[in-house]
Image: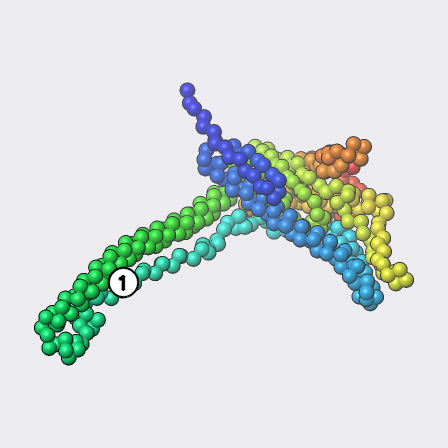
Amino acid sequence: MAIKLSFQEVLTHPGLNKVRIVKASSYYELEQKCSAIKAQWAEQWARKQERDARAAEAAANKALRNARLQSEAESVSFAAEQTRKAEDLQKALDSILLTNLNAMPFNFEKLKTHDCFKEPCPPNKEMLPIPAEPLITDVKYNPKLSFFTRLSKKKTAAKQELYKAVFEKDHAQWQEQKNSIIAQNDLISKQNTSSKAQWQQRHDEFYKSQEENNKLVDEFKENCKAGDAEAVANYIKAELDCFSLPIEYNESTEVQYSPESKSVVVDYEFPAAENLPNLKSVSYIKSKKEFKETYYSESYLKKKYDDVIYQIVLVLLNTLFSNDDNRPSIEMVTLNGKISTIDRTTGQPIEPYILSINVKKDDFSALNLSAKDQLWAGIKDTFYFSNCF
C-alpha cells in the first residue's frame, strides 16, 4: 500500500491577527504555498501600516485644530484645507473604476528579495602584546659599581650575585607573564575565528534563503503559466489585493480556480457602509472660536455606497478577465461579496454576504466600462446578479 505523505506548516502574522494552516503533499509545494501567503501578508501589512499612519495623521490634524484656535487666519485656512480634502476624497470614491481600469499586471519581482546582507563582518580582537624579555646584559642588572666596591673583589662578586638574582626573578616573572599572554592570545584567536565563522554562516544562510525564495517565486510564476490551480488562485489573490481604494478597511480575498472550466470563484470582502467617509465640510466659527463639521445625509451616503460597491465589482471583474501572460485566461467568474459590520440589534460582529454575480468573459467584454453612469442600468439584466444591500 502506498503511503501518502502530508506536509503542513502553521503561519501566523500577529500584526494582521492572522493564522493559517498550510497543507501540501510535498515539501516543495508547502514552501511554494507558504511563500505566496507570506508575500500577500507582507503586502497587506504594509498597506495596514500606511492606513495606520494616515489615521494617526488624521488624529493629529484633529488635535491641531484646538492649537490653531489662537490664529483666526490659520483656523480659516485649516478649515478650508480640511474641506478640500473631504471633497477630494469624495471625488476619489467616484473615480475608483477609472483609476483602476488600466492597472498593470501583478509583478512577480515584488515577491523576490534582493537585499544585501547588512551585518558587517566582526573585526578581529587585538592580540595582547608580549612585553620585552629582560636580558642579563640590560643596564638594570649591570649598574655602575662605586669606587670602593670595585676595590674589593668580594664585594664586587656579591653585588654581581645580587643583580643576577634580581635578573633571574624578573625573567621568571616575565616567562610566566608571557605564557599567560600566549594562552590569552590563543583564546582571542579562537574567538576571532569562531565569530567570523558564525558571521560567515549567517551571511551564507541569508543569501541561500534569498536564493531559495527567489527560486520559489520563479517556480510559482511557471506554475501560474502552466495553469496549476493552487498557483493561479494565489496569483489572482495577489492581483486583487493590488488595486487602489481610497477607503480604509480590512479587506480579504479567497479564490478557487478550476483549470478544466477556466472558471474562478472569488469570495471578496467589500467595505461596509460605515467605512465610507461622511465628512462634507469644515468651517471656522469666528464668534465662537471653534470648528464646525457638516456631514453628508444618509440618502447621499446610501447612493454613494451603492456606487462604490458597483465600481469595485467592475474593477474586480475587469482584473479577472483581463489578458495576463502570467496566468491562463478566465472564461467565467463567480463573485461573492461580503462585509464585516456590527449587527445593530445585537451589537455582535457579523459577516453577511451582500451580493453574488456570475459573469462570462464574452458578456463582460461587451461592456463599456468608461461609461459607468449608464452601465448599471442594464447589468442586472445581463448577468445573474443578487444584490442584498
Left or right of 101 on screen, residue 68: right
Residue drawn where x is 78% and y is 52% of the image: 90
Q: Sort mark 1 into few (<14), some (14-19) or many (20+) by Cα contacts within 10 Å.
A: some
Q: To which quarter of the image does residue 343 belong?
A: top right
Q: Is residue 347 visible?
A: yes
Q: Nearer the viewer, residue 379 or 268?
A: 268
Extreme-left residue of the structure = 153
Residue drawn where x is 58% and y is 33% of the image: 258
Q: Which residue is mark 1?
A: 130
Residue drawn where x is 76% and y is 59% of the image: 64
Q: Is residue 249 above or below residue 343?
A: below
User: How are the residues colored?
Assistant: rainbow
Q: Nearer the viewer, residue 9 or 24?
A: 9
Left or right of 262 on screen, residue 128: left
Find residue 150 and report its horizontal and vertical position in percent: 12, 76
In what quadrant of the picture does the C terminus appear?
top right
Q: Is residue 262 visible?
A: no
Extreme-right residue of the structure = 287
Counting labels gives 1
Q: To which quarter of the image does residue 180 belong?
A: bottom left
Find residue 220 and report its horizontal and vertical position in percent: 50, 42
Q: Secondary structure at mark 1?
A: loop
Find residue 229 and report its horizontal and vertical position in percent: 55, 35
- In the rendered structure, which amino acid carries the disc numbered 1? Ile
Extreme-bottom residue of the structure = 147
Residue drawn where x is 17% and y is 78% of the image: 146
Find residue 231 and report its horizontal and vertical position in percent: 53, 39
Q: Nearer the viewer, residue 82 or 337?
A: 82
Left or right of 71 on screen, residue 21: left
In what quadrant of the picture does the N terminus appear?
top left
Left or right of 84 on screen, residue 226: left
